[in-house]
Amino acid sequence: MIDYENLGLLNKPFFEEFKTAFAETLEGGWYILGNKVKEFETAYAQYHGSKHCVGLANGLDALTLSLRAFNFAPGDEVIVPSNTYIATILSIAQCGLKPVLVEPDIHTYNIDPEKIEAAITPRTKAIMVVHLYGKSCEMDKITAIKEKHQLVLIEDCAQSHAASFKGQLTGTFGEFGAFSFYPTKNLGALGDAGAVLCNDDTLATAMRRLRNYGSDVKYYNEVVGVNSRLDEVQAAFLLVKFKYLAQITQHKRQLAAIYQEGLKSDFIKPVVHPDYFDVYHIYNIRHERRDALKKYLLDNGVKTDIHYPLPPHQQKAMEGIIDGNSYPISEEIHRTTLSLPCSYCHTKEDIAQVVKVINNF
Ligand SMILES: *Cc1c(COP(=O)(O)O)cnc(C)c1O
């Protein structure tokens, strides 16, 4: 059986270094906002050429606090793609803001820049883009719209560590780049973790305050904050894993290349274009008979996943939060998409085997 993902196997090459990192943290005796968090923030900011990185508890908080930092008024609107993971939309809802959904491009699965301007109203304050599956959005067109309409730009980079557009890393285009280090992400911790990147000193200060009870000086609270600190021990693990991000990325790209070359044209494959450096957080294909294909693969020893089975606007929890419109392109993607094994834990032989099985469908 070929697993879709196997976190124990994925992390195995790093076990010894993780053990050392854990022992250092344990013996160091400082478990919240210590040197490991600082070290990781510095390294992650530096890698991106960003002025600041602020470590947070998870990716959802990275998105939510990015919005909170601007003190938008309740009911202000945030433009967001109609096909994304629910967390993106939840961050907007949590701030009392209104998500305004814009359809994706059917080929890239990312927000269609040509459709953004039609969704802008006098209440629009921000665009929250999602670099889905590890492919950057079309950031030249999106930053032009942001500039023209003077909107805040927040990037959901939970699936796009090390991905870039025209040579620029995702997370560096907007006021905030919001990252998740959930264990399955391309840069994954051993528990929940997240961070934001930003270049503005005032915004960075606001973020540090928000994550730590709204406080700059212990026991003096400036704003209503939350507890969303990156754990010291997770930062220690992330420092280990970060050294191997390029290697992890390269491996996933090699596996994706095997699919791209080997899969028959019956399956709609991800588009590849020289402007985009894709990191394949998820390697998806699309097929009319997706559910039958999924079952066939399972019967033949290949586990797969679906990202995602139900679009946000059809989720029960979103009643009254998202308008009642239909989003046919998003629905089409959700109906036909299938995620194939493409993890650091897989070998090239595993993927060649999947190709063989799937081509016989
Ligand atoms: C994983 C993910 C998140 C949320 O990250 P958590 O760390 O689980 O809170 C947000 N957006 C997208 C697109 C994701 O894939």
Image (cartoon, rainbow, N blue to C red):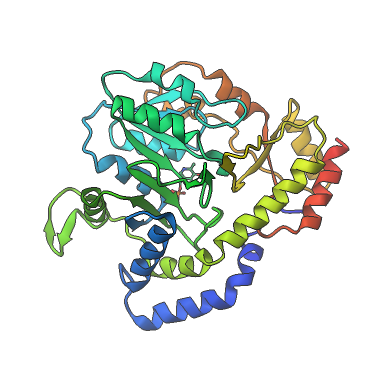
Residue drawn at x 52%, y 40% is: 136
Residue drawn at x 28%, y 56% is: 227
Which percent across, then down, holds residue 326?
51, 17
Q: Is residue 261 left or right of residue 210?
A: right
Question: Quick one: quadrant of the C terminus?
Answer: top right
Q: Is residue 334 visible?
A: yes
Is 39 in front, or is 315?
39
Farthest bottom residue in view: 27
Q: Is residue 333 left or right of residue 285?
A: left
Which percent across, then down, holds residue 125?
28, 29
Which percent across, then down, holds residue 229?
32, 59
100 in relation to 169, above or below: above
Question: Quick one: quadrant of the N terminus?
Answer: bottom right
Is 265 in front, or is 183?
265
246 in relation to 125, above or below: below
Residue 278 lies in quadrant:
top right
172 in relation to 37, above or below: above
Residue drawn at x 55%, y 60% is: 245
